[in-house]
């Protein structure tokens, strides 16, 4: 039987997803011996071992895991192409892999996902929420919402919004802390800082009031690399902090946190939607990207305006 690489890729992906040659063969409607033969031929063709096999389980090797991500994306593109040719106008379908900062995921995208699912039930999302800067091509990510400047020349970058920040503290802290009326008074206060976990860089806080600016330069009492822990420290009364407004909104609305120097506004972080130049933007990725852009554009906490 002639070796068909696409069929072998499908078999391999099903083995990884189901963790079993037997289950993969059943899902594909073919004998287990055929699936085993396709996998062996694929490994021979590639010259690498794709799977670890024991009597109890099957799992991808390091090379196999990397190959799986790229193969799955390729197969989904093939399926989408064939579907578009045979059924023009059909709803987009397939899997979309997307990365975004945790506050964007938790407080903007995920709460709105029921509407996306209702509109595009055949699109399946793999959503990663973290503060690390992922390599989209290397990790098989279709698109990402990214905070801060984007300098990678291999990425298409579309500005879509901004993350706003609030300088805030707990009422308990302010009740016993020195008076706070101007930025100069900040020197008498305890400060908490956020450190980006991927780079170890501390977030720099600059306040704006009309044409005037003030940079907070005091050494922080404590530093945190997790947004939830950072806000919990402010709630505990440990000091002042500059936190994403959307992330702190429940505490600000309940009075657990209050904004200080409200006329002095912290610098916002630009938000962009990025995807590789080298990757065709499929219909399923395009509809998610357009939906996410509209979602951010229509939310006053995130809009560019």
Image (cartoon, grey):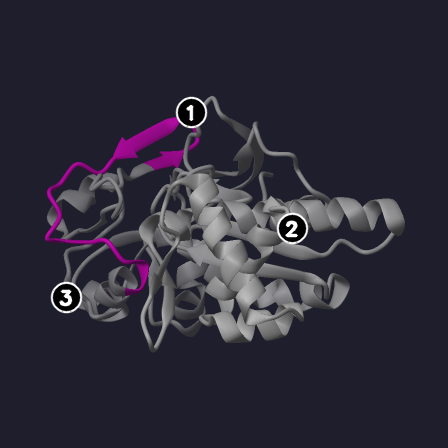
- Please identify, in this view, whether the residue under mark 3 or under mark 1 is nearer the observer: 1
- Please identify, in this view, whether the residue under mark 3 or under mark 2 is nearer the observer: 2
Q: Residue placed farthest to the bottom in the image?
A: 56
Residue placed at 65% from the left, 50% from the top?
A: 76
- Quadrant placement of the C terminus: top right
Q: Residue placed farthest to the top in the image?
A: 153
Q: CA distance from mark 3 to mark 1?
A: 44 Å
281 and 165: which one is in front? 281
**In the displayed structure, does residue 120 sit left or right of residue 151?**
right
On the image, the x and y values in percent for residue 278 come to 57, 28
Q: Residues within 10 Å of mark 1 (few under 14, many from 20)?
A: few
Which label's residue is closer to the chain start, 1 or 2?
2
Label 3 sits on a secondary structure element that is helix
Answer with the quarter of the image where residue 25 lies.
Answer: bottom right
Which residue is identified by label 3? 176
Which label's residue is closer to the chain start, 3 or 1?
1
140 and 290: which one is in front? 140
30 and 209: which one is in front? 30
Q: CA distance from mark 1 to mark 2?
A: 29 Å
- Residue 32 in view in this figure: yes
Label 2 sits on a secondary structure element that is helix
Q: Are marks 3 and 1 in contact (CB under 8 Å)?
A: no
Label 1 sits on a secondary structure element that is loop
**In the displayed structure, does residue 247 sit left or right of residue 84?**
left
Of the numbered discs in the image, which one, if any, rests on residue 76? 2
Which residue is identified by label 1? 151
Magenta-tinted stretch:
207-228
Answer with the quarter of the image where residue 216 lies.
Answer: top left
Residue placed at 33% from the left, 55% from the top?
A: 61
287 and 37: which one is in front? 37
On the image, the x and y values in percent for residue 24 come to 55, 70
């Amino acid at each position: 039987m002639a070796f068909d690489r696409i069929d072998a890729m499908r078999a391999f992906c099903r083995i990884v997803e189901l963790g079993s040659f037997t289950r993969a063969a059943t899902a594909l409607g073919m004998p287990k011996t055929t699936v085993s033969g396709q996998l062996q031929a694929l490994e021979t063709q590639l010259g690498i071992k794709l799977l670890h096999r024991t009597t109890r389980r099957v799992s991808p090797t390091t090379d196999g895991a990397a190959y799986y991500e790229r193969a799955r994306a390729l197969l989904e593109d093939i399926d989408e192409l064939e579907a578009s040719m045979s059924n023009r106008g059909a709803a987009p379908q397939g899997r979309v892999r997307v990365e975004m900062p945790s506050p964007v995921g938790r407080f903007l995208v995920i709460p709105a996902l029921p509407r996306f699912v209702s509109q595009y039930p055949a699109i399946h999302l793999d959503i990663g929420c973290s503060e690390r800067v992922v390599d989209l091509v290397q990790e098989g990510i279709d698109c990402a919402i990214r905070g801060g400047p984007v300098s990678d020349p291999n990425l298409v970058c579309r500005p879509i919004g901004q993350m706003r920040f609030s300088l805030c503290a707990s009422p308990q802290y302010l009740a016993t802390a020195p008076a706070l009326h101007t930025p100069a008074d900040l020197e008498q206060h305890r400060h908490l800082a956020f450190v980006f976990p991927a780079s170890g860089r501390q977030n720099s806080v600059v306040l704006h009031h009309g044409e005037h600016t003030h940079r907070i330069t005091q050494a922080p009492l404590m530093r945190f690399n997790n947004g939830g822990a950072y806000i919990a420290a402010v709630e505990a009364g440990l000091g002042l902090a500059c936190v994403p407004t959307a992330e702190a909104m429940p505490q600000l609305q309940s009075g657990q946190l209050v904004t200080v120097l409200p006329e002095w506004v912290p610098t916002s972080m630009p938000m962009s939607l990025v995807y590789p130049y080298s990757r065709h933007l499929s219909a399923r990725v395009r509809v998610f990207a357009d939906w996410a852009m509209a979602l951010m554009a229509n939310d006053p906490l995130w809009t560019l305006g």
